[in-house]
Image: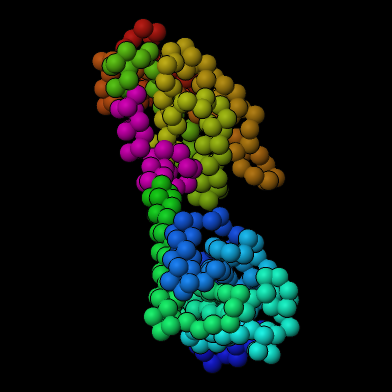
C-alpha cells in the first residue's frame, strides 16, 4: 500500500521510520557479520570507503564503516538520504558535477568525496532504510560485476537483519509461551475463587512432603478447617456474600500461617493446611491464632452489620508411615469432634500419635 503514498509525505516517512525501528538496529554495537560485508565490498569495488548506513529521522547512522572514522553524520549533508529516494543502485560518478552535491561540505571540504554508489537496504514491505555504499576520493565508475556484487551484498545485509529480527520474534514467542504455560499451570493448580491450591495440587504437594519425611525430614502437621454454619450465610445473604466470606477467609489464612505452610481449598467451605516441620502443638498454636483473627475480623466489606464467622478444626501429625487417605480420615474425625463439642474450636490428636 505504501507504493501509492508520496515518498516525500509525512505519512510515508513515518511508516519508513517505523519499519526501520522494527529491526532494532540503530545504535547497536559493531558486529563482525556487518564489518566483514563492508570489508568485502570495499575490496570488490576497490573503494577506500565503504559503509552500511541507516537514515534515521535527523541523522545518518553507520552500523559499520571503513575509511570514515565516525558512526553518524547529520542528515542534511547525507548523500545516502538522496539514495533512498531512488530505485535500484544510486551512482554519482562525480559529485562536483552533480548540482545536488557540488556544494556539500563533504565534497567541498574534508574528506573531499568525489564518487558515490549505494545499494538500497529495503524492508520486507519495500521501505528504504539505508544503503550499503562505497565512496572514493576520485571520480570513477563501477564495472557491471562490481554493481552486481554491491547489490548482492546489500541483499545479504538485509537477510542478516531479517534473521536477527526473526530470532528476536522467536525469543519473544518462547517467552510468551513460557509465561502462558506457567499461567496455565498455575490455573490448573489453584482454586479459581481464592487462589489457594486446589484439591489435586494439594494432594501432589502432600505426597512430596510425605516423601521428604520418609527420607528423614521432621514430621509435619495436617489441619482440616470447616467454616461453621456457612450454609446460613448462603441462605440468608446469598451466594455472592458466601463467596466474599470464602475469599476473605483465604486472605486471613495467608496472614495467619507461615509462608512455608501449604494452604488449599478442599471444597466448598472446607480448607486444608499442611504445616511442614511442625508439631501438633505448633499447629494448634497456629489454629488458636486463626480463631482469634476470626473473632475480630469482619468477613465482608463495608456493610451496616459486620459479619463474623467461626471455624471448627481438626489436626493430626504426619510421619514416615502416614498415608494421605488415613490422615484425611483422621483429621475429618477430629473436625467432627470439634463440631460435636460446640464448634468454634480445635481438636487435636494426642501428641505422639502418628499415622
- Residue 81 falls in image quadrant: bottom right
The residue positioned farthest toward the top in the image shown: 352
Task: Residue at 35%, 31% (x, y): give it.
Answer: 205
Residue 298 horizontal/vertical position (percent): 63, 36
In this rendering, position of residue 244 left or right of residue 172:
right
Q: How is the image coloured?
A: rainbow
Q: Is residue 242 left or right of residue 188?
A: right
Percent from the top left, x then y, of residue 217? 35, 15
The number of discs equals 0
Give coordinates of residue 284: x percent, y percent. 48, 16
Q: Indicate whether residue 195 is drawn in magenta.
A: yes
| Magenta range | 185-209
What percent of the width, then of the height, locates residue 119?
A: 49, 79
Give 94 or 328, whichever is nearer the viewer: 94
- Residue occupying image coordinates x 67% and y 42%: 305
Q: Is residue 10 visible?
A: yes
Amino acid at each position: 500500500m505504501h507504493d501509492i503514498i508520496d515518498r516525500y509525505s509525512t505519512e510515508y516517512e513515518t511508516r519508513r521510520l517505523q519499519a526501520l525501528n522494527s529491526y532494532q538496529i540503530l545504535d547497536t554495537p559493531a558486529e563482525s557479520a556487518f564489518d566483514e560485508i563492508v570489508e568485502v565490498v570495499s575490496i570488490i569495488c576497490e573503494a577506500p570507503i565503504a559503509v552500511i548506513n541507516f537514515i534515521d529521522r535527523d541523522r545518518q547512522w553507520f552500523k559499520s564503516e571503513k575509511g570514515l572514522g565516525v558512526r553518524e553524520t547529520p542528515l542534511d549533508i547525507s548523500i545516502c538520504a538522496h539514495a533512498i529516494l531512488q530505485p535500484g543502485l544510486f551512482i554519482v560518478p562525480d559529485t562536483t558535477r552533480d548540482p545536488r552535491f557540488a556544494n556539500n561540505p563533504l565534497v567541498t571540504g574534508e574528506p573531499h568525496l568525489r564518487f558515490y554508489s549505494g545499494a538500497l537496504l529495503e524492508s520486507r514491505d519495500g521501505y528504504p532504510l539505508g544503503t550499503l555504499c562505497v565512496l572514493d576520493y576520485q571520480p570513477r565508475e563501477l564495472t557491471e560485476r562490481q554493481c552486481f556484487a554491491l547489490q548482492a551484498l546489500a541483499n545479504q545485509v538485509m537477510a542478516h537483519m531479517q534473521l536477527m529480527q526473526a530470532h528476536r520474534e522467536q525469543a519473544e514467542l518462547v517467552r510468551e509461551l513460557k509465561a502462558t504455560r506457567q499461567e496455565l499451570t498455575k490455573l490448573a493448580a489453584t482454586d479459581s475463587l481464592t487462589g489457594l491450591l486446589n484439591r489435586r495440587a494439594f494432594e501432589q504437594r502432600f505426597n512430596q512432603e510425605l516423601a521428604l519425611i520418609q527420607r528423614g525430614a521432621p514430621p509435619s502437621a495436617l489441619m482440616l478447617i470447616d467454616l461453621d454454619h456457612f450454609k446460613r450465610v448462603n441462605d440468608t445473604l446469598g451466594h455472592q456474600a458466601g463467596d466474599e466470606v470464602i475469599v476473605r477467609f483465604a486472605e486471613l489464612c495467608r496472614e495467619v500461617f507461615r509462608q512455608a505452610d501449604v494452604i488449599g481449598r478442599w471444597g466448598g467451605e472446607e480448607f486444608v493446611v499442611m504445616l511442614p516441620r511442625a508439631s501438633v502443638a505448633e499447629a494448634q498454636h497456629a489454629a488458636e491464632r486463626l480463631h482469634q483473627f476470626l473473632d475480630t475480623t469482619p468477613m465482608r466489606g463495608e456493610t451496616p452489620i459486620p459479619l463474623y464467622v467461626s471455624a471448627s478444626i481438626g489436626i493430626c501429625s504426619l510421619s514416615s508411615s502416614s498415608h494421605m487417605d488415613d490422615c484425611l480420615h483422621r483429621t475429618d474425625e477430629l473436625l467432627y469432634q470439634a463440631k460435636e463439642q460446640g464448634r468454634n474450636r480445635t481438636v487435636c490428636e494426642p501428641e505422639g500419635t502418628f499415622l
